[in-house]
Amino acid sequence: MTKLQRFIIAIPAVLLLAGIGMVWVFANWQSLFGQYRPMEALKAVYTLEVKGESVAMMHNIDNDTLYVTKGSITPLVDQMKEQGYELTAQDRTAGRLVFQRDSHTVSVPTQPFWRGYRVFINPPL
């Protein structure tokens, strides 16, 4: 078999394997990536790591607005203070932060995100 014949056979084989791989990822994307959109998650990590910002925004598959910080809750608490909210309670067991502005109380769920990052779900920023 010549090199040209091997090449002609290799192209459909590679395309077939790529197609099977794409179908597998499409069928299992939620178990692979969880509730987060992969490109949005990468963009948020890029914003934190490369751009050096303290808080990055992204959306999950339900279109909830998520804010991501690196490790600490302090950057989000500071942004909430700029909006006039004061941190009144931190429930670590339930994973919630409670903020208050005037007589308006807001509970912000929080959860770990990858290694060293924290996600805040729907804060009023």
Image (cartoon, rainbow, N blue to C red):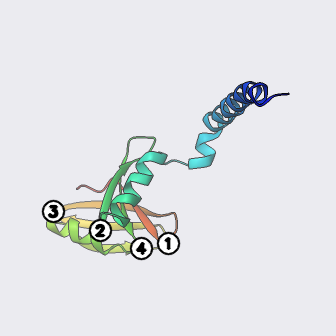
Q: Secondary structure at mark 1?
A: loop
Give the label, 1 or 4, closer to the camera: 4
Name the residue carrying label 2.
54
Q: Which residue is mark 4?
A: 71
User: Which of marks 2 and 3 precedes in the sequence?
Assistant: 2
Q: Secondary structure at mark 3?
A: loop
How busy is the neighbourhood of tag 2: few (under 14 within 10 Å), some, or many (20 plus)? some
Q: Find the distance from the CA under tag 1 to the CA under tag 2.
A: 25 Å
How far apart are labels 4 and 3 at the CA level? 22 Å
Q: How many marks?
A: 4
Q: Residue 58, how many percent across, how many down? A: 36, 50
**Is 48 situated above or below 23?**
below
14 over 84 or under it: above or below:
above
Q: Amino acid at mark 4?
A: Gly
Q: Earlier in the sequence, mark 1 or mark 2?
A: 2
Q: Which mark is residue 83?
A: 3
Seen at 35% across and 64% down, the residue is 50
Please give left or right for residue 13 compared with residue 62 in the image.
right
Q: Tell me which residue sits at (15%, 67%) in the image.
A: 82
Q: Amino acid at mark 3?
A: Gln
Q: Residue 99, located in which quarter of the rendered image? A: bottom left
Which mark lies nearer to you, 4 or 3? 4
Q: Residues within 10 Å of mark 3 (few under 14, many from 20)?
A: few
Give the mark nearest the N terminus, 4 or 3.
4
Q: Residue at x 65, y 39 (%)?
A: 28
Report the mark closest to the observer, 1 or 2.
Answer: 2
